[in-house]
Amino acid sequence: MPLEIKKVGVIGAGQMGNGIAHVCALAGYDVALNDADPDRIRSGLATINGNMAKQVAKGTVSETDRQEALARIVAADKTEDLADCDLVIESATEREEVKRKIFSGLCQVVKPETLLASNTSSISITRLAAATDRPERFIGIHFMNPVPLMELVELVRGIATDDETFEASKTFVTRLHKTYAVAEDFPAFIVNRILLPMINEAIYTLYEGVGSVDSIDRAMKLGANHPMGPLQLADFIGLDTCLAVMQVLHEGLADSKYRPCPLLVKYVEAGWLGRKTQRGFYDYRGEKPVPTR
Ligand SMILES: CC(=O)CC(=O)SCCNC(=O)CCNC(=O)[C@H](O)C(C)(C)COP(=O)(O)OP(=O)(O)OC[C@H]1O[C@@H](n2cnc3c(N)ncnc32)[C@H](O)[C@@H]1OP(=O)(O)O
Ligand SMILES: NC(=O)C1=CN([C@@H]2O[C@H](COP(=O)(O)OP(=O)(O)OC[C@H]3O[C@@H](n4cnc5c(N)ncnc54)[C@H](OP(=O)(O)O)[C@@H]3O)[C@@H](O)[C@H]2O)C=CC1
């Protein structure tokens, strides 16, 4: 019998985790939101509340739907609080050892039939699956940022992912009113294999003095019709995540064309991770973002 998903656990209440919880709750799923830091869960819930209020103000979500969706989300302070979930989506920091540890702990508490998924931007689904007791019930469900607004989800099967898990994931994504694209399990899948080298190249363009932050973003917005400039987008994604994806591409494909720009490394070493730390290629601490170079 195909598995029916009623309750979804989300691990990591950062910008992606809160977006995933948001769209799941609006689609009628019960949601348990977990993070290593309970304060993050509270701030994630506050962000969801605010983002749903924006949708109500725009008329894309009714106030009743917002109230009902908010009531479906509970804070899961401990991993044990995810025990009754039918699907758990991990969306913690983009570091393989962090994710492996989360999955091995999670397997101790969830039901044998629970599906496990990762929202990783780049890391091998097959390798993450191998850290669990159920590689056949493990899959990559890769949402795009900002989750409530972006239509695409990449579905990535590991070598062992079975058909039932794949079909249940397709049904799940469709119920979220999103469209999926299937990607093979190679470093950074499809979107980030193409997008992140473009962002890294924009950072090289800055590093080599070809243009300023302002010129590079303006050039790509007005010259290539991108909704955000590549440096603005890098800040939006998070520079730690951008660097982690480039490292996975560089190591996984062993090709120097993926080497992370030293300027990206420097920003991450400074803790200037973009919007989430208020500083990256732009400084967000004032009224308007100001370029930092
Ligand atoms: C790294 C990975 O692994 C994969 C990735 O995700 S890569 C990143 C992929 N994402 C992108 O490339 C995004 C590129 N940017 C865009 O497409 C657009 O700039 C955007 C969709 C983010 C915003 O579009 P925009 O036209 O500039 O509209 P903007 O005015 O900023 O926002 C549209 C509305 O949505 C609202 N909104 C923004 N974020 C929201 C959220 N998380 N939830 C709900 N509403 C939101 C805004 O408040 C705004 O509402 P109002 O019109 O009432 O002000
Ligand atoms: N940013 C983006 O545009 C996209 C990101 N992704 C992927 O989504 C995932 C999350 O990214 P994003 O939301 O941007 O990152 P954030 O930094 O916003 O959030 C990550 C969250 O995970 C928490 N966390 C870290 N370790 C653990 C743990 N052991 N258990 C539970 N929670 C933990 C972090 O807490 P703390 O800060 O306290 O460490 C933080 O709250 C990554 O895999 C990323 O690659 C996918 C698509 C798009």
Image: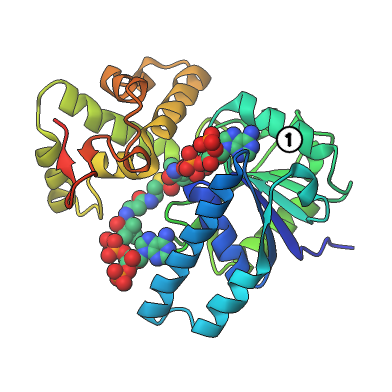
Is 49 situated left or right of 167 in this image? left
| Residue 6 percent coordinates (x, y) | 76, 66
| Residue 104 seen anywhere in this rendered image of the structure | yes
Q: Quadrant of the C terminus?
A: top left
The foreground one among 281 and 149 is 281
Colour setting: rainbow
**Image point 71% across, 50% down: which residue?**
88
- Give residue 255's quadrant in the image: top left
Between 193 and 221, the residue placed more toward the observer is 221
Q: Which residue is mark 1?
A: 103
* Residue placed furthest toward the front: 39
- Classify mark 1: residues with Cα within 10 Å, few (<14), some (14-19) or many (20+): many
Q: How many marks?
A: 1
Answer left or right for 112 relative to 57: right
Q: Amino acid at mark 1?
A: Phe
Task: State which quadrant residue 24 falls in.
Answer: bottom right
